Image: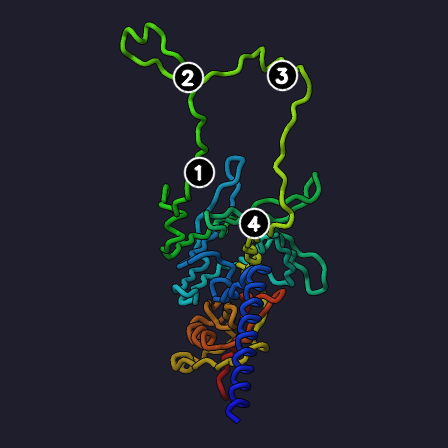
Amino acid sequence: MFRMLNRLCLVTLCSIGLSAAASAQSNLTAKAGSAPATAPAVETDRSRDGLIGPVRRVRTEVAKLLTADGGKQEGKHQVVEMVAYDLKGNKIENQYFPIAGATLTGKEVYKYDEKGNISEMTLLNPDGTLLSKETYKYEFDFLGNWSKMTTSVAVVDSRGITFEPTEVTYRSIMYYLDENMVKMVTPGAATNPQPAAPVAAAPAPVSKPESKTAGKNNKKAPVVPDLPSASTSAAKLASGPVDVKVQTVNTNQPLPIVMIDEPPPSPGPKPILKPVSGGVLNGTAISLPPPLYPDAAKRMRTQGVVSVDVILDEAGKVVSANASSGPQILREAAIQAALRARFSPTKLSGQPVKVSGVINYKFALVP
């Protein structure tokens, strides 16, 4: 009985040792044959907005290009948007300031460049006919985020279809400070020291007999190695081809494996800067609270329709509201109601986008 137990224990220990060796061998083979797997990048609000690096704040301004003195000059800068992110990339602030008359209504079709930025926008009428076309050119900062965008509108002249610059958009981008940013912005920043290459041993100098003058002055003349004369070298070259010895390479010797890190995947399309036109939004709202009828308006028997121009962010939240028409005494109540409205997120080419539109509120007194 005890012999049987001893044999079972011995067999178990042997099997455990063999499995451990096989596991270690498989791990070594996996490490030698493939690069280590990298953890997938965590998607944040900052990366979804198409920004690279530890961006802290982005301030976007727009300036119209006006014709003056035979050339184009920038007009007054107007703030369009201010966005802030925390260290983890979560959006903690988002303010949008719409510009009156800056958005046309229609179906917008976009094209992107190799970096994922919008390169062209075509505006179509509801029936599919062409309404307008714009192109966009960018300038980038030291980290690869665009800092200037020039908008050009398609026009027709004697040369055919050309694109005339009409607007310039600037982005002032501030970054959090970390080690990588210090190395990029600080000239002569300390880097990891590289090991010095081994210096080949110099040939031993050939001693020359000291001259009599050197012996008299009790000074040693500098030792200079003898160089072959030009005639000797020419004679060797003229005598025939020179044998060149090449060191043979042992093919049986295993070659070292070089691990190459794969470049990160290119970012997807950047979000659209300008809001997409949505027209009248009353029928698309998830929640549309009614406005409070002001007591002063009731006493004055004031009624009518108030139109409120709104901007929706990527989540469908109203971030800006401005009454454009209707009785003045009713506008503030309509604005407050519009700010409480909620909508479903809108996506274009799979990317969440901002939407501009109008909410109409009808104020009517019950007879």
Q: Which tag is nearer the camera, tag 2 or tag 4?
A: 2
Tell me the CA gap for discs 1 and 3.
33 Å
Q: Label 1 neighbourhood size at 10 Å, few (<14), some (14-19), many (20+)?
A: few
Mark seen at residue 224 = 2
Identify the residue shown where x is 58% and y is 13%: 232
Return the disc, 1 or 2, that comes first in the chain's sequence: 1
What residue is shown with label 3?
236
Give amino acid for label 4: Thr
Q: Which tag is nearer the camera, tag 1 or tag 2?
A: 2
The image's colour scheme reads: rainbow
Identify the residue shown where x is 52% and y is 80%: 13
**Residue nearest the viewer, comparing 303 with 235:** 235
Q: Residue furthest bottom?
A: 1
Mark seen at residue 151 = 4
What residue is shown with label 1?
198
Give amino acid for label 3: Lys
Return the disc, 1 or 3, that comes first in the chain's sequence: 1
